[in-house]
Each structure stands twice: as C-alpha cells, then as structure tokens.
Image (cartoon, helix red, strand yellow):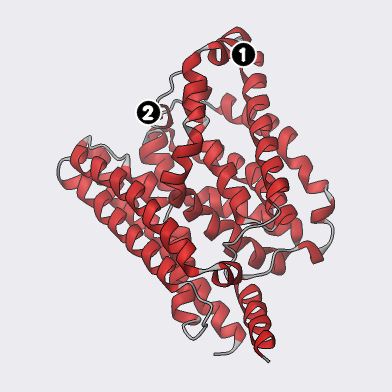
Amino acid sequence: MKMKEKTKKQIIIFLAVAYLLPFILGIFMGFGYSKGASLSIFPNAQMYYPAAGVMLAALITRKGDALLPRRFFIGFILLTAALVVAAIGSVFSSSTIWAIMSQWLMIGGSLVLWILYFIEGSARRKAYGMKGGKWKLTFLMSLLFLALYILRLAVSYGISGQIGYFADIFKNPTAWIVMATFIPSFYLSFSAFFGEEYGWRYYLQPLLQKKFGMRKGVILLGLIWGFWHLPLNFFYYTSPSMGIISVASQLITCVTLGVFFAYAYMKTNNIWVVVIAHYLNNNMALVATGTFSAEVISNQTITWNDVVFLLIVNSLLFLGFLASKVFRDRKNRIPTMDERADAAAAEAANSVQ
C-alpha cells in the first residue's frame, strides 16, 4: 500500500471511530437526557475513542509490522467497546448498575493495559510513541501546568472578589487529601486520559502540523478537539438551552490548553507529559470549586460573561507558548505515526545486519 493511500485510509478509520462515534452516541445521550437518565458513562467512554481509532487504523494498515504492539492495542479496543456497551445500556436500564460496572471496567481495564504495556517490550512501545523519555523535563512540565492551573484559579476567584474562598479551599485538609489520591488514582484510570492524548497529540497533531504548519496545525487541532465535545456540551456539561455557550467555552479551552499540550509534547517527545497534564486538568476540577465532587463537571451554568473571561485569562496564560522556539522550526515537529514506526523498523533491520 502506497504511503498516501495508507495515510488516507488511516485518517478515515480514525475519524470514523474518534469523531463519528461520539456523535452517533450523542443520539443515545439526547434520548437519555429526555428520560432523565444519568449520562455519566458517556464522557468517560468518549475519552477512549481517539486512541481506539488510531489503534484500529494501525492494526488494519500496518498489520505486517513486527513492532506493532498488537496485544496492547487489541486490549484497549476491547475495553473501549465494553464502555460503549455500558454507555448505551445505561440509557435503557438501571444507570446505577451500569455506572458501577463502567468504573470497574476502567479500573480493571487500566490494570490489564499496564500489564500488556510492559509485556509489549521497549522496542514496540518506542516504535508507536508510548515509551516516553526526558522524564525530568516531563516532571517539570507537569508542575508548570499545575502551577498555571492554580494561577488561573486564583485569578478567577480574585476578579470575582472571592480570593478568600480560594484561600479557604487550600486551607481545607480535604483538598490535600484529594490531591494526594491523584498519584494512585492515575495508575487506576490512566487509560481514559491516554485515550484522548494518544489520538489528539500522538496521532493527529503531527499530521496537522506537517500539512498546515507548526502553529496553524495546533490551532486547528484545538478546534477539532473542541467540537469533538459537542454532544457532551449539550447533554452533560450543561443543558441543550445552554449548549452553544458551552461549545464556545469548550473551543476556547481546547485551543488554549492545546497550545500548551503541544508545547510540552514537542519539548519532551513524551506522550505521557500530556496524559499527565490532561489528568491534572480534569481532576483538579474536583478541588477548584471546593466541593471535592465529580458532580461539579455536569449540569454547569455558563454565561457569555464567563466565556469572555475564559478567553482573556486562558489566552494570557497559554497562547504565549506559541512564541516559543519549538514552534518556529519544522524540525521540532513530532514524527507522524508512520514516520516513527518506519524509522523504528529500519533501525531494527539495521541492527540485525
């Protein structure tokens, strides 16, 4: 199969799973919303679709590659399929039972995937961008993102005249207990965050940067990532009446965070830096409001004033990274999946000779 044909086929498969599937499932979300059913499984399941799309594309178009981590990829796809079934099932029968089942699927699935991850071996993980590296810089980037997140939170509370409440959040021992659980919890739920970042940053970012340029590619990725949340914006994060405002907020969030994620990924060439940052972003929301509950993510009330404020603050905190050196030279672009895998295959072949 010629390279252009292979890439085209991969993109079609990826988009069908990563992008079309959430909108098909959005029909079930709309039905469940009208019934008053709990839709909490849908956002969790949706996080798996991007990586599942990449993995299915690789299994189909690169099946002859000896370095393909088949066991990990197949395990991830099976876990994704099980979560899709749980999400749909929660609309038609007891959502509580399905929710409990989905949590155990995510935890058990993550543990199994860790085992498969290490069974695959270093060469396969490296060939398909899962190995990681530059761990000291990765750690520093994760701390930088956490610092920016807390700064954004402080500015938000400060402007609204609630800086005292912000201080009280971190005076509360519960906040520190919750944050202390982040480390063990990451290992039990990493698969969801890996699910998004392996699709967006590992697979799609290099393709878009190769086609549209270092900066435009990342901005476009942010827009694609933002619109991908649309079913959740209308039926989970807010309500249909507030869906447009939620979409606008989502686009700003994904474009601005996407700039930092791209920066961190290109600086480290380590997919785990964005998996960790994404994990921190989602889980710090439990601390940010002082409620320490995951319920804060759903049924939000968002105004256009909130959207404008988000645009200003996030732009100031994150868009400046576009001026960094890594965005100036195409040599800093992360290799595409095929470029990386083909280089690894060539390296393996040369080592045998």
Please report the residue visible at 57 percent of the width from the left and 44 percent of the height from the top.
276
For the residue marked with disc 2, what is the amino acid?
Answer: Glu
Q: Secondary structure under badge 2? A: helix
For the residue marked with disc 1, what is the amino acid?
Answer: Ser
**Mark 2 surroundings: few (<14), some (14-19) or many (≥20) residues within 10 A:** few
Q: Secondary structure under badge 1? A: loop
- Could you say where residue 136 lies in the image, as x and y percent from the top left? 71, 46
The quadrant in which the N terminus is found is bottom right
In the rendered view, would you say 341 is above or below 294? Answer: below
**Distance of mark 2 from mark 1, alpha carbons?**
22 Å
In the rendered view, would you say 174 is above or below 17? Answer: above
Residue 160's mark? 1
- Could you say where residue 214 lies in the image, as x and y percent from the top left? 75, 59
In the rendered view, would you say 56 is above or below 205? Answer: below
Q: Which residue is mark 2?
A: 295
Please report the residue visible at 52 percent of the width from the left and 26 percent of the height from the top.
303
As rendered, which of 333 and 172 lies closer to the eye?
Answer: 172
Badge count: 2
Residue 323's mark? none
Label 2 vs label 1, nearer the camera: 2
- Could you say where residue 287 lies in the image, as x and y percent from the top left? 50, 24
Q: Quadrant of residue 53?
A: bottom left
233 horizontally vs 321: left or right:
left
- Could you say where residue 10 lies in the image, as x and y percent from the top left? 51, 75
Disc 2 or 1, which lies upstream in sequence? 1
Q: Quadrant of residue 189?
A: top left
The quadrant in which the C terminus is found is bottom right
As rendered, which of 71 and 245 lies closer to the eye?
Answer: 71
Q: Quadrant of residue 249?
A: top right
Please report the residue visible at 47 percent of the width from the left and 22 percent of the height from the top.
177
**Mark 1 surroundings: few (<14), some (14-19) or many (≥20) residues within 10 A:** few
